[in-house]
Amino acid sequence: MPLNMHRHVKSDGRELLLYSDMPLDVSVGVEIASERGSASHMRWHPLRGEWVVYAAARQARTFLPQANDCPLCPARDGHVSEIPFSNYDIAVFENRFPAFSADAALEQTLPGENVKVATGRCEVLVYSSDHNASIGQLSNAHLSRLIAVWGERVSALRIMGYPCVLPFENRGEEIGVTLHHPHGQIYAFSFVPAQLQRAAEAQASVPVIAQLLETLDRELLVRDESDALSFVPPFAMHPYEIWLAPRRRVASPELLNDMEREALAVTLGDAVRRLDKLFGKPMPYILTVQTAPRGFEDTFHMMVEIKPFLRDVNKLKYLAGVEQGAGVFLVDVLPEQAAQKLRAVL
Ligand SMILES: [Zn+2]
């Protein structure tokens, strides 16, 4: 699928990429500019063996603006936007309030090897110009384009030198979303986060995902699109958790062929519609696109994880004592029951 991209550099130097199958109107409207904040830094947590990131500049970020002040809607009739174009299909731009930024100039001023400038790149990925269209409402063709954009960004950021790239979406105010316009984000890390390193090492020693797909109990299946499947993992950590995976092992979305990308797009829209139907309201969730960190390209099987945060109508799943204190997840819905309900809901 050809993916036309128009590159625009905003007045503050941030990059904006517009993706569309149609010719783009390149007229530039009124755009939001940032004052580059102070660089964030990270400190090593010696007990967890993980970095903790301090990003004080993010406290100032836009918080739940009214729809007519939405910074992700196209710039029309003087509307001030992050995206100063009258229309677009999918847009990606560098976050105005990044947790990580490319500025490594402060490195020498920080004490010790357990403190580092948080270098990296944070991008916002706007799913469409429609203020209300979540993944469940976008067409399969549009979702296929979204998966292609995930792949294009993962590939581009890896070429820029980042060893690990995570596209994700936090959906719902329950998860702390600060803008309602449906969008995801992409973090490119200067290191491989410990959790992702562990998962990649597990896949390197045993082809976990391929084995899971081969031996999957039909009871756990949500949708079978032949080239891609959605299912509840038998070891789900969240109630109604859904994983989406291409049947063939590819390390990252840009390596999917057209058929596989289209099949994955069908399972993606379908999964979100089922989750939204489950309790009759938009499901808050965390969606992550798991792609191979550097060095694991030959063994990693990419997938999409959707972790919902409602366990019942008006009952939030909290990560509480045992989850936070011991890393042990308590789930009150059996994966087989969750899959059965998800299959029956549409
Ligand atoms: Zn909007």
Image: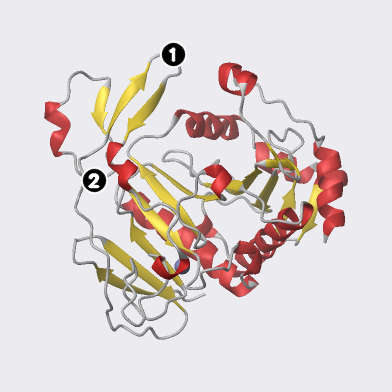
Q: Report whether 227 appears left or right of 219.
A: left
Q: Give the labeled residue for mark 1.
A: 47
Q: Quadrant of residue 333?
A: top right
| Residue 167 coordinates in the image, percent (x, y) | 48, 50
- Of helix, strand and loop, which one carries label 1? loop
Q: Report whether 15 appears left or right of 305.
A: left
Identify the residue at image location x=31%, y=24%: 43
| Residue 320 coordinates in the image, percent (x, y) | 62, 24
Which residue ends up furthest to the top in the rendered image? 47
When the figure is inspected, residue 295 is found, relative to residue 2, above or below; the finding is above
Identify the residue at image location x=45%, y=63%: 66
**Residue type marked 1:** Leu
| Residue 228 coordinates in the image, percent (x, y) | 69, 57
Q: In front: 223, or 177?
A: 177
Q: Give the labeled residue for mark 2.
A: 102
- Of helix, strand and loop, which one carries label 2? loop
